[in-house]
Image (tube, grey):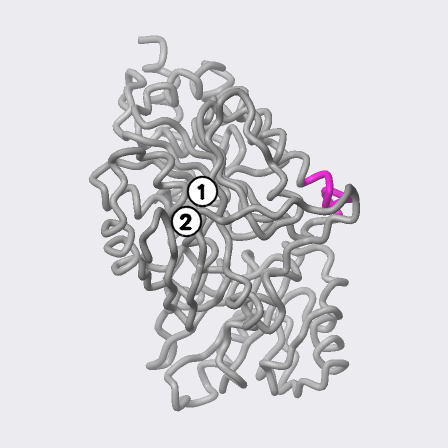
Amino acid sequence: MRFFIPILIGRILRALARARGGGSAYPGFIVLKLVPDFLQHVTKQFPNGVVFVLGSNGKSTTTHMISDIVRAHGLRVFTNPSGANLPQGIASALLSEVSLTGRLKADIGILEVDEAFAVELAGILSPSTVTMLNVQVDQLYRFFETERVATMMLDTAALSTANVITNHDDQFLDAYTAVDGQHVLRFGASDEVIAAAPNGLQNADSFGGGARTQTAADAEVVAHTGDGATIRFAGAEIPVRLPARGLHYAVDAAAATATASAALGAQFRADAVTKAFGTMKPAYGRGERLPIAGESAEFTMFKNAASLQLNLDALPDHPEQVLMAIDEGTPDISWIYDIDFSKLDHVDVVSGDKAWQIAIALEHAGVRIGRVEPDVEAAIKHMEQLGATTRGTKNFIVNYEIMMIARKALGHPDMEKTA
């Protein structure tokens, strides 16, 4: 009964935070202060263990994919919102999944984890499976060197109690070798599929060490067109309908398939993968479509050069109407001059705190700009007034924080929830 009062307090705080439109980690912070072993006590109850998902890009989408695949096998899943990937955030998200006595309702935990806290969390939660998606240039103002992020992921993988899923096409991650009896699966895309991508997979280069030892991918994207892909896994070719366009989504799907197989063991069925993807909705704000002026606003979300480039590459040539916006949630956008903007022949409105920085980069790239409007809500009103498109789509290319503002402006103020 020692969990009763802390969980009750946490639930009250969580309800108050959500009533004010927030998804605060503060309730989890308080619970951990009152019962420091709350996370250990709860997560050891998962019959099918805990899965960690790490990576510079694609964590939220892949976590979403794994969760839907596992649910298609009949299991109950606990997973965390992308903003709740630190200890206090995970504790806060768990408050809706446990009874007042601390008993868990789910069969498996599938968690997106911040790389900087992954080793610490692994020591607390003892993940049975760790999935490493990619090492891409990201948040240098925070991590300084890409190699540091790779080391964080590899050190976390070494703490997995059973399975490690790693990226065959990533120079940092492919070299991982099993420790203490771990089972290692690799995912990736075929050479032909990668060669067809305008700017490749955007994985970071490793300039240290000797020549790579070539490995084989266990789950491999062997075909990809728009929002469809075929994944070769365990001797079968699994067709999937992706929740959004892009090769990166196909590679994430291969990672999710391998992860679900490792976590489920003999329960895994290839037909359940196809079934799960057939009804899968986009992850929150990532390829999501929301109503605007009788059409749809399609959200393309990014946080660094790699995610922006991969999402631009997936766009149809020369979208009819485009809003591009970045705010201080992405502090350093000096990388924007490395982006290939050839898919865009114009941007109707540039917005956010960094609107003028974007505008200069677009001008250098030869992209026409209709208007610079730093105020995001005013920029959205401008998009509403542009009239109809032939495709019924207005493209919103935004970072996470702008995505939240835009969703609210379009009448969708809901916060990202546990899936």
State yes or no: residue 74 in magenta: no
> Residue 242 versus residue 387: which sits nearer the camera?
242
Mark 2: which amino acid? Glu
- Which residue is at 54% across, 33% downward? 86
The reply to whether the C-beta atoms of the residues labelled 2 and 1 are less than 8 Å apart is: yes
* Residue topped by disc 1: 23
Q: Where is residue 383 in the image (x, y as percent from the top left)?
A: 49, 81
Highlighted magenta segment, given as a residue range = 141-149
Dominant SS type (magenta) = helix
Outermost residue, left side: 74
Rendered location of residue 291, percent (x, y)? 35, 73
Residue 416 marker: 2
Q: Where is residue 43 in the image (x, y as percent from the top left)?
A: 39, 23
Q: Which residue is drawn at 55% across and 56% down?
A: 401
Mark identifier at residue 113: none
- In the image, is 55 to the left or to the right of 64? right
Q: Which of 275 and 372 is in front in this view?
A: 275
Q: Decide if residue 354 is on the left or right side of residue 122.
A: right
- The quarter holding residue 2 reads top left
The quadrant in which the N terminus is found is top left
Q: Is 144 included in the stretch rendered in magenta?
A: yes
In what quadrant of the picture does the C terminus appear?
top left
Query: Which of 99 and 133 lies nearest the eye of the viewer?
Result: 133
Q: Residues within 10 Å of mark 1 (few under 14, many from 20)?
A: many
Q: What element carries label 2?
A: loop
